[in-house]
């Protein structure tokens, strides 16, 4: 193939690297009002009084808004397809604040300095309540985070607000207890995964203004323009038809920008003042007043027979959703959704709750519950293998789901593709399993050891996420590809163009890609849930095929032959006999004017009832310092089955990036709070993401499969790559020093203390 | 958010000092990397850029480092690379990145007595003095133990006594502040041990240094004893990067490694 | 307060506030390649050259740059495009938000270090954070870029 499978540079790459002004703040009007937010210093409190009079008198202050000035419709910031599964539990501003950083007042001024000055002049009196800070004590706590009557959900998610339970989940196949009773070996462990910060380089930002029709326009650094439009309509109580959301280039997302940021605040200012406004969250706000990965406690029970055949797998999950329920029920559900199908146990069950606490909300984050679940399940599999005296790779090969097998989530659809078994075998070979597993002494105080984990994710959300693509043949023979998928650096504008170019047998340069603008783009939920390559990709392929047929038909008509007697060959339609031909340019021109009178537009809306899983086998080699407990990653091998690899260099870098995020989560990234619920890790000084020196070597390989339902056989890759590092590194550390760290991150101190504990025994 | 009402760039140290003491909220500006982190309100910021305090030179048996010398200058100085086994370039080279080290200054780091400083720990095991415009010249240790006082640190003197030195640090991740750091030096059988980021500021382990200096032979056992003594005579605290207990245990490890490294030179 | 700067070879005289930092001054002057991402002097996105040295523009008071020679990527478009060719071929720009600052450091390294080893490259570039790529692709690109130049 000419385009699919080629490492084509990102079509926007040159502009990005050479520093062209293409991001939200680069294109915002210079005279836009600067919007700042006064935030709560308390984890849980009621505003007794708020006095903005002094601040309002300050020169240059345009408006100050409090809970008295906002519409009273509760909404959610979660960017999800309607009906959102997240509870409508927040107001733009409210007289109750539920975490340190919750918004108290909106300040708009001519510049940042004035806005900050005004902020200091606002006097607020609070009645402080006892906060719920420990998520394991949230259920039944004397404090109720959301006592309000008008909190609502679109459908039953198991909400019991008086108990601080946002969502409850239960899914079971087979008789778990019965199977467990018959198992030769049972592993029963509790794992904790921490809150993790997305830490994309561009913080949340939105620029709003009213257009010539008086409509609200929001240029927003978001992954979900259509959801933001719906969210703004509900929160501001104006019709969606009065709102336009445009996504420019955005500086990273990782799921962060699947949740609304400052859009509502800037929009409200623009609606109240009629003036352009912009809000830019600083890094501290981004760390402490948005969302993070949900912290979880996961209890795993896994049973097998002596030969290592897994019979039963049970997960009990407690998820900390923080002060608001963004993505609470769905992330909880995905813990099981992406772990239970992986092993063919007869009986499998997940039960769990997501609970409110007075901390920053959890949200969507690459992996979306699968990351947490994978750490727990894979750690348990590694322990099970040890208990059985079997090689952990062999146990997996024995039990993993294979192509043709039935997945428990889709009983009527056999698994269309998987090379996970080959991924495991190849990974073992590449990491040097035979020689290096489990552990070697490399210096008097240093050992090196290996660990592994496997994982799956989905490709879009089955039966919900549906993408539409349109391709127009323009007057001079080029094409406009209209999509609503949101390139956040991932390169989807490029790979979707590759697919269209492949189908239309044209060149990349002939295709203009436009995304995303709710006034122009066809509907797409946005780029999340690993949906774009697979779901939007399929929509693009089908739209391109549709257009191709139309071109052929139109060309044949001009050639005065039937479509069966003609073919599209790059830039010409010619008769099969070869006696006549017409150029694409001529077809295009004739179609938009003169006799044709019909501009050709290919169109497709695509969604699927399944979500084919991509797979990864991850292998870690760590070196542990026996005196300090510090584990350093030496080598990481990831072998990926994402179906057909549409763009190898982009897929490779996405994998490397996901693994780096996983390494950070495994070893040091940790959102921490003090005893009053104030976040301690609200800067890059205190919250460390991996730097260049932390990564060691990461090696990525692809074991392509062919997914019959995917575009050119492709599946997703964006999220699955983040899941294996934590369990693989934890396994390697265990093999190195015998310490099982079951509460992430695996800091030198935890390892050292574990070693001390072992020495005492 | 910090505020800076005025800024002066005096041409003499006397002018700078007069400006500093004229108002309580007047402050000397260092590299300014940390300035905007705080919510400090500074009436007049005093910029020492025009006082020619950016130098690393050898004079009268001392290496002198001017207050406005950047960490990057320290890192790349061939004089410092060749002195004390390059402990100073080594101590600063791990801090954040090149573009950060081109900003932060030696004077501000030492004057601020940052607990997490890798530089101060390394300087402590050398024969280091500081020169303050008002209070004059004093040993680094004496300066560190003084209560904070308004003055201008103009330079750091290090006696070029050919001592052999080593610095060690332990971090959760490479660009993080240290969980703990330690430095060890030896000249003519005199050992000096310092431990920093406890998380309080670096301090000399005097008893351990003495123990090591007095030891008849240096073997695994005496080294371990000295390292243990250091971890017992100093105090350690708990913060987000580590507990007091862990720091104490690591103090022993890092000091032991420092001693071993010095002996290997 | 009026200061004199040379920005990308052009002398300008501009009015800055006393507590204004260079990154903000430069953005206000239209040099929008200069990005800010941390507020705590540790991400490297705002890297520019001051008198040829890679420096965090977010941490330098504009007044202190009076009389200095500043270089942003807008002034190094040809060199940046050459590096961008290699970086984008690896797909290692991803979201691109950190790319201008990263590129400024790479170009500074190119003139400062001769035939750097992998470790020296990593050390020199450590101050530039990136959350998308995991750094491996950037290293591949830098090495290729230096090879091509050699």
Image (spheres, coloured by chain):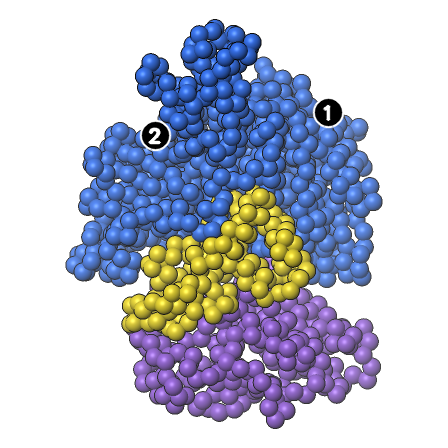
For the view shown, which residue lies furthest in the front direction? A579
* Residue A52, numbered circle: none
Circle 1 packing at 10 Å, graded few (<14), some (14-19), many (20+), is some
Looking at the picture, tell me which residue is in the foreground, A639 or A514: A514
Q: Position of residue A7 (x, y in %)?
A: 59, 37
The quadrant the N terminus of chain A occupies is top right
State the residue position of label 1: A182
Q: Colour of chain A?
A: blue
Q: Position of residue A376 (x, y in %)?
A: 62, 38
Mark found first going from the N terminus, 2 or 1:
1
State the residue position of label 2: A520
Q: Secondary structure at mark 1?
A: loop
Marks 2 and 1 sit apart, C-alpha to C-alpha, by 60 Å
Q: Colour of chain C?
A: yellow
Chain of residue at mark 1:
A
Q: Quadrant of residue C75?
A: bottom left
- The correct choice, above or below, for A280 with respect to A334 in the image is below
């Amino acid at each position: 193939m000419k385009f699919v499978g080629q490492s084509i540079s990102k079509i926007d790459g040159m502009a990005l690297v050479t520093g062209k002004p293409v991001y939200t703040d680069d294109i915002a009007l210079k005279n836009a009002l600067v919007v700042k937010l006064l935030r709560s210093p308390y984890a849980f409190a009621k505003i007794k009084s708020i006095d903005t009079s002094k601040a309002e008198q300050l020169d240059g202050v345009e408006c100050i808004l409090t809970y008295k000035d906002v519409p009273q419709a509760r909404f959610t910031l979660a960017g999800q397809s309607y009906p959102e599964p997240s509870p409508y539990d927040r107001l733009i501003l409210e007289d109750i604040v539920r975490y340190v950083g919750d918004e108290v007042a909106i300040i708009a001024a001519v510049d940042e300095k004035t806005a900050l000055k005004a902020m200091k002049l606002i006097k607020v009196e609070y009645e402080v309540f006892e906060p719920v800070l420990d998520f394991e004590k949230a259920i039944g706590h004397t404090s109720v985070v959301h006592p309000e009557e008008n909190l609502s959900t679109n459908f039953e998610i198991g909400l019991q607000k008086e108990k601080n339970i946002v969502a409850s989940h239960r899914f079971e196949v087979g008789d778990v207890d019965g199977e467990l009773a018959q198992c030769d070996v049972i592993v029963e462990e509790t794992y904790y995964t921490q809150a993790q910060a997305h830490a994309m380089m561009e913080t949340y930002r939105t620029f709003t203004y009213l257009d010539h029709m008086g409509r609200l326009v929001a240029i927003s650094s978001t992954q979900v323009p259509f959801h933001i439009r719906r969210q703004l309509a509900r929160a501001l109580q104006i019709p969606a038809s009065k709102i336009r959301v445009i996504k420019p280039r955005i500086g990273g997302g990782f799921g962060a920008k699947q949740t609304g940021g400052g859009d509502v605040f800037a929009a409200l200012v623009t609606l109240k003042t009629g003036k352009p406004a912009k809000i830019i969250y600083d890094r501290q706000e981004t760390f402490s007043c948005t969302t993070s990965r949900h912290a979880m406690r996961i209890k795993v029970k896994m049973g097998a027979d002596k030969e290592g055949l897994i019979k039963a797998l049970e997960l009990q999950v407690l998820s900390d959703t923080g002060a608001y329920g963004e993505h609470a029920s769905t992330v909880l559900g995905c813990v099981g959704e992406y772990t239970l199908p992986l092993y063919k146990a007869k009986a499998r069950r997940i039960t769990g709750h997501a609970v409110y606490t007075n901390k920053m909300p959890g949200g969507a984050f690459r992996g979306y519950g699968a990351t947490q679940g994978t750490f727990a399940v894979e750690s348990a599999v590694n322990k099970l293998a040890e208990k059985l005296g079997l090689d952990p790779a062999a146990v997996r090969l024995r039990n993993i789901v294979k192509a043709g097998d039935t997945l428990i989530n889709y009983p009527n659809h056999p698994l269309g593709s998987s090379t996970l078994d080959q991924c495991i075998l190849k990974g073992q070979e590449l990491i040097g399993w035979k020689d290096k597993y489990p552990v070697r002494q490399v210096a008097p105080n240093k050992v090196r050891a290996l660990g592994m984990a496997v994982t799956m994710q989905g490709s879009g959300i089955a039966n919900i996420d549906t993408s539409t693509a349109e391709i127009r043949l323009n007057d001079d023979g080029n094409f406009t590809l209209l999509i609503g998928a949101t390139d956040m650096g991932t390169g989807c504008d490029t790979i979707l163009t590759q697919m269209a170019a492949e189908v239309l047998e044209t060149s990349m340069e002939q295709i203009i890609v436009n995304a995303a603008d709710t006034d122009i783009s066809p509907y797409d939920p946005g780029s999340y849930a690993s949906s774009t390559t697979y779901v939007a990709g399929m929509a693009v392929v089908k739209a391109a095929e549709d257009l191709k047929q139309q071109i052929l038909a139109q060309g044949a008509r001009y050639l005065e032959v039937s479509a069966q007697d003609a073919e599209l060959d790059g830039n010409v339609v010619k008769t099969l006999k070869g006696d006549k031909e017409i150029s694409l340019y001529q077809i295009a021109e004739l179609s938009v004017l003169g006799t044709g009178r019909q501009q050709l537009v290919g169109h497709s809306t695509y969604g699927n009832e399944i979500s084919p899983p991509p797979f990864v086998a991850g292998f870690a080699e760590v070196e542990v310092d026996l005196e300090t407990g510090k584990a350093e990653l030496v080598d990481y091998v990831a072998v990926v089955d994402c179906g057909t690899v549409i763009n190898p260099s982009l897929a490779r870098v996405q994998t490397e990036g996901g693994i780096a995020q996983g390494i950070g989560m495994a070893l040091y990234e940790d959102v921490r709070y003090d005893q009053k619920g104030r976040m301690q890790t609200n800067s890059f000084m205190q919250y460390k993401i991996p730097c260049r020196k932390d990564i060691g070597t990461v090696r990525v390989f692809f074991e392509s499969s062919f997914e019959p339902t995917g575009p050119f056989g492709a599946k997703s890759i964006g999220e699955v790559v983040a899941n294996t590092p934590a369990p693989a590194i934890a396994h390697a550390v265990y093999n190195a020093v015998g310490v099982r760290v079951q509460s992430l991150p695996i800091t030198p101190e935890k390892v050292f203390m574990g070693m001390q504990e072992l020495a005492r025994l | 958010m910090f505020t800076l009402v005025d800024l002066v760039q005096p041409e003499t140290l006397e002018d700078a000092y007069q400006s500093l003491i004229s108002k309580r909220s007047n402050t000397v500006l260092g590299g300014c990397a940390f300035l905007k982190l705080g919510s400090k309100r500074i009436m007049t910021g005093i910029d020492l850029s025009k006082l020619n305090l950016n130098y690393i030179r050898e004079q009268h048996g001392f290496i002198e480092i001017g207050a406005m010398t950047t960490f990057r200058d320290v890192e790349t100085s061939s004089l410092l690379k060749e002195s004390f086994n390059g402990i100073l370039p080594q101590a600063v080279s791990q801090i954040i990145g090149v573009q950060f080290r081109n900003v932060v200054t030696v004077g501000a780091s030492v004057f601020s007595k940052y607990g997490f400083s890798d530089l101060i720990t390394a300087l402590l095991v050398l024969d280091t003095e500081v020169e303050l415009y008002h209070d004059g010249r004093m040993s680094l240790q004496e300066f560190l133990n003084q209560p904070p006082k308004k003055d201008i640190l103009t330079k750091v003197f290090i006696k070029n006594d050919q001592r052999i030195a080593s610095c060690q640090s332990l971090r959760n991740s490479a660009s993080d502040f240290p969980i703990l750091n330690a430095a060890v030096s030896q000249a003519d059988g005199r050992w000096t041990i310092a431990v920093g980021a406890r998380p309080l500021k670096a301090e000399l382990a005097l008893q351990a240094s003495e123990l090591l200096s007095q030891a008849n032979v240096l073997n695994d056992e005496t080294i371990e004893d000295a390292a243990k003594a250091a971890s017992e005579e100093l105090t350690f605290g708990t913060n987000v990067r580590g507990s007091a207990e862990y720091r104490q245990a690591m103090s022993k490890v890092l000091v032991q490694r420092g001693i071993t490294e010095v002996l290997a030179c | 307060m009026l200061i004199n700067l040379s920005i990308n070879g052009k002398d300008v005289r501009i009015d800055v506030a006393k507590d204004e930092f260079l990154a903000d001054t430069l953005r206000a002057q239209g040099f929008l390649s200069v990005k800010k991402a941390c507020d705590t002097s540790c991400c490297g996105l705002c890297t520019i050259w001051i008198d040829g040295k890679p420096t965090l523009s977010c941490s330098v008071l504009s007044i202190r740059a009076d009389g200095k020679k500043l270089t942003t990527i807008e002034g190094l478009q040809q060199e940046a495009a050459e590096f961008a060719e290699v970086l984008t071929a690896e797909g290692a720009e991803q979201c691109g938000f950190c790319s201008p600052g990263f590129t400024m450091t790479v170009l500074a390294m190119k003139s400062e270090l001769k035939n750097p080893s992998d470790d020296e490259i990593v050390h020199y570039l450590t101050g530039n954070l990136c959350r998308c790529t995991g750094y491996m692709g950037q290293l591949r690109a830098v090495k290729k870029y230096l090879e091509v130049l050699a």
